Amino acid sequence: AISCSIDSHYRRPSYTPNHIPDPKYIRIFDTTLRDGEQSPGATMTTEEKLDIAKQLAKLGVDIIEAGFPASSAADLEAVKLIASEVGTAVDEDGYVPVICGLARCNKRDIDLSWEAVRGALRPRIHTFIATSRIHMEDKLKMTKEVVVEKARSMVAYARSLGCDDVEFSPEDAGRSDKEFLYKILGEVIKAGATTLNIPDTVGCTVPHEFGQLIADIKANTPGIENVIISTHCQNDLGLSTANTLAGACAGARQVEVTINGIGERAGNAAFEEVVMAIKCRGEVLNGLYTGINTKHLVMTSKMVEEYSGLALQRHKAVVGQNAFAHESGIHQDGMLKNTLTYEFISAEDIGLHRTDKSGIVLGKLSGRHALGAKLSELGYDIDGKELDDLFWRFKAIAQHKKNVTDDDLMALVSDEVFQP
Ligand code: KIV
C-alpha cells in the first residue's frame, strides 16, 4: 500500500544562486510573510513576522520572502530584522536560509529591497513587472518595448548593487503571450537574473497547461540552462498545488508556497500540501525531493493561523483539524486494526501528536468497536452485553450532538453502572 514513511535524513545540496548540484532537488521558497501577508486582514507585527521566519528556518525553508520593503516603513524594518537575525544564523550543517525582498522594476524599490536584505548571509532581490496584454495596457499603460527595457535595466541595476542572487517574475505569466515571455526572460537572463519565477497570478491555469508553459519556457528561452525556473501559483480555481507539482515535473526547481495556503484572494499553493505530496509521492513525481523537516509543519501552521488571524478550515488538507480524525464506524474499525487503512500520511511525520493514536472522534456514525476502544482508553473494561447496552444509549445521545466527548462517555458509564 502507498504510505508516507518517516525519514529523519534531510539532504540539502550546497547553495549557489543559479545552480542546484542535484537535479532532483526542489527549493522551497516561502512567501507567507509577503504574499501571505497580502491576504485581506492578515497584517502581522514585526515580532510575529520574526517568530514565523525563525520557524520557517526550523523547517529548513531554502528561501524566505520576508516582505515588500518599499510597501511600508514597517515592512522595511521587519525584513531588515529577519535578514540580520534569521539570515545569519548558520546551523551545524551549514544551512542558513536565503532572505528575499520583493521590489517593482524601479530603482527606489530595488534600493529599499537591497537595504533590507543585505544584512543576510544570502540576500536575494526579487523584482517583477507585468507581461500580459491586459496588465501592460490597462494597468501599467506601457508598451511591450518599455516593459522589456524596464525589466532588463532593473535586473542589471540590482546586480550592480552587489547582489548576486536576483529573481525576476513576469507578473500574470499565466495569461501572457509565450513568444513575449521567451523574449523578456532571455533579456533578463543576459542582464544577470539567477531565478526566473513564472506566476499564474490570477490562478486561471489548469495543471497540464501550466506544466506545458514551464516546459515551453524551458525549451525556448535563450540561456535558460543557466538559471533556476520557479513556480508561483495562486489558488483561484483550487488548482494551485496541482499546478505547482505539474510545473515541478516539467522542470521548475523552485516552488513558491505559503503556510496554510494564505495569500491574495483564494490564496497560494499551500506549503504543507506541496511538500507532503513531494515527500509522499516523490516516486511518481520524477523522484523529486525537498530539504524540509516536516515534523515542524503542524506547529508552523498553528503559529501562522494565530498570527495572521486567518482561521484554518477544519478539513484543510494535511494540517486541518479533521485531516487526521475519523468518525464513521467503518473507518474507525479499520483505524483500530491498522492506521494505514485510512491514513497514508503519518501523523508523527508532520508533528501531530494525538493522545489517541487512531484519531477516533465519536459521533452518530461511530461503531461499537470504536466505543469499546475509547472506553478502554478512559480506563473502563466493558464488553459483551454491557457494551451492547451502552452502545445503544450512546447512539441515542450521539444523534443530538456533533461530537460525543470523554465527559459524555463518563457520564454515560456512571449512569449505566449506577442505574437503580
Ligand atoms: O502573484 C504574483 O504574480 C506575484 C508576483 C509578484 C510573483 O505575487
Image: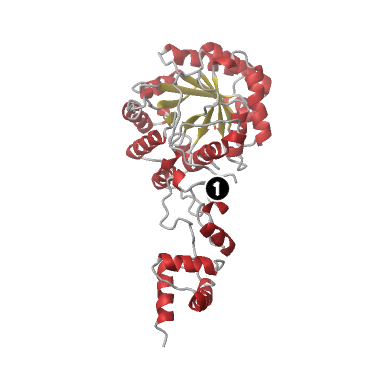
Image location (x, y in percent) of residue 279: 52, 37
| Residue that sits furthest to the bottom in the current view | 420
Q: Is residue 328 above or below residue 64?
A: below
Q: Quadrant of residue 219?
A: top right
Residue 124 can be seen, yes or no: yes
Q: Residues within 10 Å of mark 1 (few under 14, many from 20)?
A: some
Residue behind mark 1: 344
Question: Observer-nearest residue: 110 or 121?
Answer: 121
Question: Observer-nearest residue: 123 or 392?
Answer: 392
Residue at 61% in and 37% down:
203
Total marks in image? 1
Image location (x, y in percent) of residue 245: 59, 34
Residue 88 in the figure: left or right of residue 336: left
SS category of the residue bearing label 1: loop
Residue 67 can be seen, yes or no: no
> Mark 1: which amino acid?
Phe
Residue 330 in the figure: left or right of residue 101: right
Q: Is residue 349 above or below residue 114?
A: below
Q: Is residue 259 above or below residue 18?
A: below
